[in-house]
């Protein structure tokens, strides 16, 4: 089971990158380009809050998983 | 447990829950009255006001809440739980009361939306600090084998806060005519808050500091720098990440789908009358709320992990069938109209030199459902007739028959059950994950990121996905090709489904039910 936990770390890293790509390309950039005042704040939130949390968080989480930080020691 | 201890614990839970309930009430009042607030403070057609309005909506819910969690979490780990969540309550109560006192845009211009925005930000900051404090405080008073049950009282407060906010609005609306409510009556729910806060502060003032924290403080075991210890050390930070991606992220989307997305779907997709829609949600929440306690207590017996994860899993597999059934129950497409009962009424109202015409079309259906479409338009301005009319505004309202109404209540209730499964045990789960000296800080941040950011963005992302699917269908209709989406209104659900599914897998793989930090 610990092997699966570690290998799944790669999945979380890839998922973080994919999530970041989706949020920037499909959500943030179209909103920045829309010239609509109401879109600016959501665009900033997608680009500078949700994306860093998702990408940064999942990259670190995946790295910890790969390193065996979440292994069941029992 | 002795009778005196039980009484004292009940008082602690009541005092903590009441304060948290008021904070949620205060937070939701703004959202529930968003439409009327926007007309008073954020006039349409003004880009700066629109920007401030969006800031008030998004910033308080998403950006400020985690900052509140950090700020007050740190304070709670340094000076204690009691004083910190007393401060958050006072900030929240005063901000809410003052929102109800701010003169409208027409009276003081741009100062009005700026003041409302600042007060809304203070609300978000206070909310970010409240929950972690209340959950920690109750957990640190509770016996180990009943921690899930006792903290689940705190978990009921968010749902009850929404329930009471809707209830107060309905009562206030019902006690005056529409004109009075639109003029000043909408302020009443904000003013009521101050009374509740005064009572709650008086109760909380009498409470003692958490025994676990007081002991740690007297032994010099509290943290000197909770932020650094929470997020700067891998040993603890890995649990913060696990709490976020393996629990609170999924809990946030399940929570928002079951309550807010359901309400938005009922009001915007099905066009159900606002009061009837609110009643459907209120009844669903009312019937479901006791289950927070049921699952909280159950988590003391069989563990927290699998109850929360089971809630996510059933949500993943049943959201699309549930919303499809909601659509079938509420959509007029499935109802048989009685053409002979169709009525069209037109009236004209003179305001100064303008004339506004209102046309109300009423349709009745065989099952008793009524559909009203109202079109308001200005046909004369400055004494000059206008053709075609301007400022055309259309509103649609479906008033459902009894059977469809109760079917929707049942479908919302089922979603609330999922909410209670993921949310009931989570306070105890989070509290047990982190050591006492950095508990307030460590548990508050993943909770508010999961709930506020992943959950809070649900309406925006889900609406975007549904709108994209509808556009694709419209384009296909124009091109004469096959429709790419059978039910475009269900496409928005992919966001909570994917987030909850990922959270389930992470939680199932990595959360070790036996792996608790030393609690005391």
Image (cartoon, coloured by chain):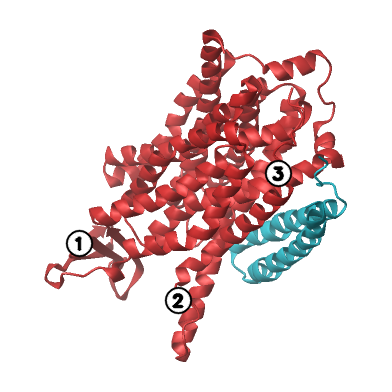
Circle 3 Cα neighbour tier, 10 Å, few/some/many (<14 / 14–19 / ≥20): many
A28 w.r.t. B512: above or below: below
Residue at 35% in and 39% down:
B185
Residue at 46% in and 46% down:
B416
Tell me where residue B199 appears, x and y as whole percent: 48, 20
Chain cyan in the figure, letter: A
> Mark 2 or mark 3, which has the lower sequence index?
3
Secondary structure found at label 1? loop
Of residues B440 and B411, the one drawn nearer to the viewer in this rendering: B411
Which chain does the numbered disc 3 sit on?
A: B
Tell me where residue B138 appears, x and y as whole percent: 61, 24
Answer yes or no: is residue A14 visible.
yes
Answer yes or no: is residue B105 visible.
no
Quadrant for the C terminus of chain B in the image: top right
Residue at 67% in and 67% down:
A32
Q: Residue furthest left?
A: B340
Residue at 44% in and 91% down:
B480
Q: CA distance from mark 2 to mark 3?
A: 37 Å
Circle 1 Cα neighbour tier, 10 Å, few/some/many (<14 / 14–19 / ≥20): some
Of residues B412 and B425, the one drawn nearer to the viewer in this rendering: B425
What shade has chain B been given? red
Of residues B64 and B516, the one drawn nearer to the viewer in this rendering: B516
Locate residue B461: give its quadrant: bottom right
Q: Residue furthest bottom?
A: B480
Q: Residue A40 got which mark?
A: none
Residue bearing mark 1: B367
């Amino acid at each position: 089971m610990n092997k699966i936990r570690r290998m799944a770390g790669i999945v979380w890293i890839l998922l973080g990158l994919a999530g970041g790509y989706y949020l920037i390309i499909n959500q943030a950039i179209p909103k920045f380009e829309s010239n609509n005042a109401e879109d600016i704040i959501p665009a900033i939130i997608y680009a500078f809050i949700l994306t860093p949390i998702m990408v940064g968080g999942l990259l670190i989480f995946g790295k910890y998983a790969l390193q065996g930080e979440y292994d069941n020691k029992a | 447990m002795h009778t005196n201890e039980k009484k004292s614990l009940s008082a602690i839970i009541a005092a903590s829950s009441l304060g948290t309930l008021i904070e949620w009430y205060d937070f939701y009042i703004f959202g529930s009255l968003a439409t009327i607030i926007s007309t008073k403070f954020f006039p349409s057609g003004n880009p700066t006001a629109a920007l401030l309005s969006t800031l008030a909506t998004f910033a308080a819910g998403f950006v400020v809440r985690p900052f509140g969690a950090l700020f007050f979490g740190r304070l709670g780990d340094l000076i204690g739980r009691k004083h910190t969540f007393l401060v958050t309550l006072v900030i929240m109560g005063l901000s809410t009361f003052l929102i109800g006192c701010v003169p409208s845009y027409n009276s003081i211009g741009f100062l009005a939306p700026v003041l409302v925005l600042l007060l809304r930000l203070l609300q978000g900051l206070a909310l970010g600090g409240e929950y972690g404090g209340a959950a920690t405080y109750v957990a640190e008073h509770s016996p180990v084998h009943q921690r899930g049950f006792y903290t689940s009282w705190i978990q009921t407060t968010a749902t009850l806060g929404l329930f009471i906010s809707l209830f107060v609005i309905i009562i206030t609306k019902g006690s005056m005519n529409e004109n009075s409510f639109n003029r000043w009556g909408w302020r009443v729910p904000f003013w009521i808050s101050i009374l509740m806060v005064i009572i709650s502060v008086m109760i909380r003032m009498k409470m003692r500091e958490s025994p676990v924290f007081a002991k740690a403080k007297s032994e010099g075991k509290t943290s000197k720098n909770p932020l650094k210890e929470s997020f700067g050390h891998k040993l603890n930070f890995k649990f913060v990440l696990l709490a976020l991606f393996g629990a609170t992220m999924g809990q946030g989307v399940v929570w928002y789908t079951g309550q807010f997305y359901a309400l938005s779907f009922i009001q915007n997709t099905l066009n159900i009358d606002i009061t009837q829609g609110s009643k459907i949600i209120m009844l669903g929440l009312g019937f479901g709320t006791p289950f927070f306690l049921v699952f909280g207590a159950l988590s003391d017996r069989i563990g927290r992990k699998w109850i929360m994860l089971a809630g996510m899993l059933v949500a993943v597999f049943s959201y699309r069938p549930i919303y499809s059934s909601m659509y079938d129950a509420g959509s007029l497409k499935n109802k048989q109209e009685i053409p002979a009962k169709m009525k069209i009424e037109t009236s004209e109202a003179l305001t100064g030199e303008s004339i506004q015409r209102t046309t109300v079309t009423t349709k009745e259906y065989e099952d008793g459902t009524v559909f009203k479409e109202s079109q308001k338009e200005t046909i004369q301005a400055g004494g000059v007739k206008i053709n075609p009319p301007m400022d055309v505004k259309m509103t649609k309202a479906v008033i459902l028959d009894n059977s469809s109404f109760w079917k929707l209540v049942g479908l919302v209730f089922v979603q609330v059950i999922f909410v209670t499964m993921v949310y009931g045990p989570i306070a105890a789960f989070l509290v047990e994950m982190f050591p006492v000296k950095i508990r307030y800080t460590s548990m508050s941040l993943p909770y508010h990121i999961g709930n506020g950011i992943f959950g809070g963005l649900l309406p925006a992302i889900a609406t975007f996905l549904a709108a994209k699917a509808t556009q694709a269908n419209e384009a296909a209709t124009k091109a004469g090709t096959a429709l790419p989406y059978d039910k475009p209104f269900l496409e928005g659900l992919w966001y909570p489904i994917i987030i909850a599914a990922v959270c389930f897998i992470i939680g199932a793989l990595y959360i070790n039910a036996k792996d608790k930090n030393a609690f005391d």
